[in-house]
């Protein structure tokens, strides 16, 4: 009578699977920049890089001109600007993925300006060609007489997070915090 089959089953049971490992947000699947995203900013008049956060610009605080200064990079027809974030969820052993973009606090902007997050968070691992699904939109104040931007000292505080999941659990990447600070 052989007990080899029973020993093999016991050994396999002792090797329980684990939740995904090595989970992080990168600008590509490997290499380049880890714990970073790429931002692509667009307005009705086209693509600008006034709100730009690329792998080479790893500062988590981005200062942009306040008041009318923020509008200097626009041709005058952009009443709002949308920022789409791109990245890749790096993970080993994951079977599903989830992105999220959120405010760390509700922005309070003056001069008739507002900031909002819209869209549906992506569940794709690779969002280097598309974007993570949720979009930041800054709407300027003013109107036909001219647009106004947020006042100096105001800010928009964001957090980008990502999860990788398998049948054993979920592992979260280190969040990426981004602050847009409006200056003079």
Image (cartoon, rainbow, N blue to C red):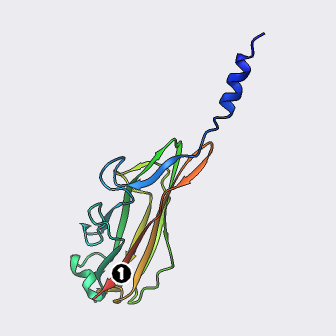
Observer-nearest of 121 and 12 = 12
Is label 1 in a helix, a strand or a loop? strand
Residue 125 rendering spot, x and y as whole percentages: 45, 48
Residue that lies at the very extreme toward the top in this rendered image = 1
**Quarter residue 61 falls in:** bottom left
Residue 167 rendering spot, x and y as whole percentages: 62, 42
Question: Compared to 95, does 58 lie above or below?
Answer: below
| Quadrant in which the N terminus appears | top right
In the image: residue 57, left or right of residue 82: left
**Quarter residue 111 falls in:** bottom left
Question: Compared to 107, does 172 lie above or below?
Answer: above
Residue 175 rendering spot, x and y as whole percentages: 47, 63
- The reply to whether residue 144 is in sight is no
Instruction: Kindly identify which residue carries mark 1.
Output: 181
Observer-nearest of 98 and 1 = 1
Residue that lies at the very extreme toward the right in this rendered image = 1
**Mark 1 neighbour density, 10 Å: few (under 14) some (14–19) many (20 or more):** some
In the image: residue 44, left or right of residue 126: left
| Residue at the image point whose x is 53% and y is 42% from the top | 95
| Quadrant in which the C terminus appears | bottom left
| Residue at the image point whose x is 25% and y is 68% from the top | 49
| Residue at the image point whose x is 23% and y is 79% from the top | 76
Q: Report the label total.
A: 1
Residue 90 rendering spot, x and y as whole percentages: 43, 49
Question: Compared to 152, does 166 lie above or below?
Answer: above
Observer-nearest of 165 and 133 = 165
- The reply to whether residue 85 is in sight is yes
């Amino acid at each position: 009578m052989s007990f080899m089959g029973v020993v093999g089953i016991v050994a396999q049971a002792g090797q329980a699977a684990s939740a995904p490992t090595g989970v992080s947000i990168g600008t590509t699947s490997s290499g380049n920049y880890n714990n970073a995203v790429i931002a692509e900013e667009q307005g009705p008049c086209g693509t600008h890089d006034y709100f730009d956060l690329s792998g080479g610009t790893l500062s988590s605080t981005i200062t942009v001109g306040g008041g009318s200064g923020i509008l200097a990079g626009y041709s005058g027809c952009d009443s709002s600007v949308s920022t789409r974030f791109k990245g890749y969820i790096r993970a080993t052993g994951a079977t599903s993925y989830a992105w999220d973009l959120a405010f760390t606090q509700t922005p309070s902007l003056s001069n008739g300006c507002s900031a909002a997050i819209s869209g549906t968070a992506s569940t794709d691992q690779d969002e280097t060609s598309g974007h993570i699904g949720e979009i930041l939109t800054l709407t300027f104040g003013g109107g036909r007489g001219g647009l106004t931007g947020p006042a100096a000292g105001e800010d928009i505080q964001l957090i980008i997070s990502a999860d990788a999941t398998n049948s054993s659990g979920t592992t979260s990447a280190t969040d990426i915090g981004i602050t847009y600070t409006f200056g003079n």
